[in-house]
């Protein structure tokens, strides 16, 4: 796996499953450019409503993976090619991600978020964007 393999446009399909049984879906695209900025845009659908959603992260290549930061530079977590599980503490909730790169360039990130305020799983599947 090379860092540059991630620099492209991705098609995204995401499912967010809450412990109460409710569910949301996101469909859109993400891109990771030469500046290592991850930009995501798409449509989030939940509860019979849909709206545009965006997010931005900063991916910093490091030996064996990436340091992923929020768009304001605060640390988020590390994607390591040899151990693809990472945690992020967002008081009082815990975020745990597991990456699956075995079928790269198709890959996924599965988040499990738990705590007194949150209880959900989020699976995001990435595939190379094909099209205009």
Image: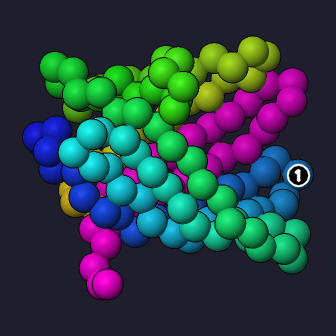
Farthest left residue in view: 2
Say above or below: 63 vs 29.
Answer: above
Say above or below: 24 vs 5.
Answer: below
Question: Is residue 126 found inside the magenta-colored segment of the image?
Answer: yes
| Residue displayed at 36% across by 56% down | 31
**Residue at numbered disc 1:** 20
Q: Quadrant of residue 72?
A: top right
The quadrant of the picture occupied by the C terminus is bottom left
Magenta stretch bounds: 107-132
Mark 1, residues whose alpha carbon is within 10 Å: few (<14), some, or many (≥20)? few
Residue situated in front as seen by the camera: 7 or 72: 72
| Residue displayed at 66% across by 59% down | 53
Q: Main secondary structure of the magenta part?
A: strand
Residue 44 location (% of width, % of height) = 69, 66
| Residue displayed at 14% across by 45% down | 4
Residue situated in front as seen by the camera: 15 or 77: 77
């Amino acid at each position: 796996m090379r860092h540059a393999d991630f620099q492209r446009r991705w098609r995204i399909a995401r499912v967010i499953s809450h412990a109460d049984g409710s569910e949301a879906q996101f469909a859109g695209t993400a891109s990771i450019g030469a500046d290592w900025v991850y930009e995501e845009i798409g449509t989030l659908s939940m509860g019979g409503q849909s709206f545009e959603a965006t997010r931005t992260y900063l991916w910093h290549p490091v030996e064996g993976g990436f340091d992923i930061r929020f768009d304001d530079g605060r640390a988020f977590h590390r994607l390591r090619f040899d151990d693809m599980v990472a945690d992020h503490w967002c008081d009082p909730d815990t975020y745990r991600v597991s990456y699956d790169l075995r079928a790269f360039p198709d890959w996924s990130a599965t988040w499990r978020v738990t705590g007194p305020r949150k209880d959900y799983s989020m699976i995001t599947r990435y595939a190379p964007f094909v099209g205009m």
